[in-house]
Amino acid sequence: MYKKLSPFKMIMFFCAVNSLIVTAQKTPNIVWIVSEDNSKHYMKLFDDNGVETPSIENLANQGVIFTHAFSNAAVCSAARSTLIASSYGPRLATHYHRRMAKVEMPEGVEMFPAYLRKAGYYTTNCAKEDYNIIKEDNVWDASSKKASWRNRKEGQPFFHVFNIGTTHESRMHFSREDMKAGTKNDQKNVFVQPNHPQTGLFKYSNARYHDKIQEMDAEVGAVVAELEKDGLLDDTFIFYYGDHGGVLPGSKGYINEMGVHVPLVVYIPDNYKDLVSVKAKTKEEAFVSFVDFGATVLNLAGIKTPKGMDGIPFLGKGVSAKDLSKRDETFSYADRFDEKYDMVRAVRKGNFKYTRNYQPFNFNGLMNNYRYKQLGYQQWSNFYNAGKLNDIQAQFYEPKQVEELYDVEKDPFETNNLAQLPEYQKTLITLRKNLNKRISKMPDLAFYPEFYLINNAFDNPVKFGQNHKKDIKKYLKIANYSLHDFNEVKDQLRKSLNSKDPWERYWALIDCSIFDKQAIGFKDLIIEIEKTDNQLINRVRASEFLGLRGISNPVASMTKCLYTSNDGGEALLILNSIVLMSDGGHKYKFKLEKSKLTKKALDEPQVLRRLDYLIK
């Protein structure tokens, strides 16, 4: 064949063949456009109560709408740490917000963009990071407000992240004076979710946030226009998503659906539509979570998911429509948000969501300074104190149930807890086992107090977790005593209260606060713990039980422990109990003096936040 071609034609033939080979081997560009603090509930593309978002809807015209995308965590640094590590926060100890200390990535694993760079990608981030993990120099070629794909080498594939802050929580820190300017979206007919007060303020808040969603949508369109201007759309996967839920009261910072169910649209480029099993202009009901996003990007780039990452790809080679049809679960976690502690875990499978409150006496409305800058939070609290809320609206300020179960398709705002109903016991037990298995397998490091982890585990949290897997499983078992009839676990509980292991005592004391008056028989033992335990936090947990039951006033004991603490994280956890005792119907009167706290306690910024609230 070749002998019949002239030398010139032979050269042209081989050039054409080489060109085809290069085209076939070329990897796609990938762009993430990320909006801050918005759940899927504000967009008509996902929810009938939302507003039109023409730019995002235009992406969906050549893309896929993922109707079940979840952020795993409900606040920025915890969610973004999950993204960049493609791993669950409680396993890595990256799930606390704001961080007191950063952790290392697990041994042998890197932040996922580092693998893209090794494969020849140009990686850029514009510009928010907010990781709770120490970042190495191999992650981004550029990470700044000026970072752009345009600085790459000619023909080099790229991964670019563009962050939009227009919908951030801070945009809802408006004043009564600001409200006079009105909103573009109709306030009169706007939807206010049933657990919120049905007031003009909440109508304004929703309409204002709809305005912000549409402003953000225009910014999404501007990024897409730049890609189109550069002739890149046919070669570029574009992910639009929210960085977690929010932002109206009771959403951001909480792992209900408003806190973690995010919008996700993935634009499918013409030149790579055969790389994915999903089809453009469709809705995909598969459950996908932030833990999977990094693994998915690597898979689209032809890179195998590294061992040690938790994420499972949902797009790219090897992911079939059948695989997607089997994805119907997500796992969520919450611990500390700024200065407020409350350990909560949740599993959603299909329509049902199971939520486990490990310290249910920490009611949802417990003070968090930044949250309460919103007038909506302030009005909600004031209405509760004035007795102006119905039962559903008042739940936010009441102690929680240890277990919650919701059919979130029928009850999207999680107002009707099904956990006690006989007809749902099989579902409840199945999801409870699912959660316990996940926690044990990871294992979940939050069964130790945060300050203890910082001091003993943060040099290598994953290794610490593996070395203490049996202990964590033991603490989980003790924490789960609260799921049983008291008389069934009374003897085990007494044994745990007398244990030499301080964290067995810690969880047993929490159980006692949950069992409330049923645990009154342990009164003398708990009084002794309050006086003599070698862990200050256990003395405080003992005081917490005694104060919740009204057996004794916890002020003197808690105050003494606070002033004694020489650790900012420990002091902050003590202050959480002090706020609980001050608020939530308990109304114990604390007269704290900042000057009496140790320097190390005062060096922690979140401690100062708590003191700002407590010391008027």
Image: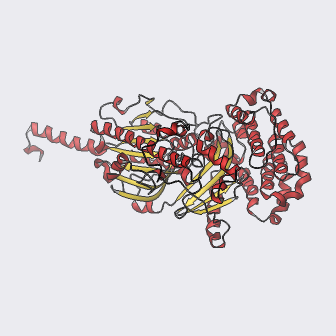
Rendered image coloring scheme: secondary structure
Residue 295 location, x and y as percent? 47, 47
Residue 38 location, x and y as percent? 50, 46
Quarter of the figure with the C terminus: top right
Q: Tally the marks.
A: 0
Residue 144 found in image quarter = top left
Q: Which residue corresponds to the image point at 46% horizontal and 59% vertical from the top-left?
A: 286
Q: Eyeballing the image, is 148 above or below 413?
A: above
Horizontal relation, residue 323 to residue 434: left or right: left
Closest to the observer: 563 or 499?
Answer: 563
Residue 91 location, x and y as percent? 62, 46
Q: Residue furthest bottom?
A: 423
Residue 481 found in image quarter = bottom right
Residue 545 in view here: yes
Horizontal relation, residue 34 to residue 536: left or right: left
Closest to the observer: 340 or 541?
Answer: 340
Residue 363 in view here: no
Q: Residue furthest front?
A: 180
Residue 206 location, x and y as percent? 50, 48
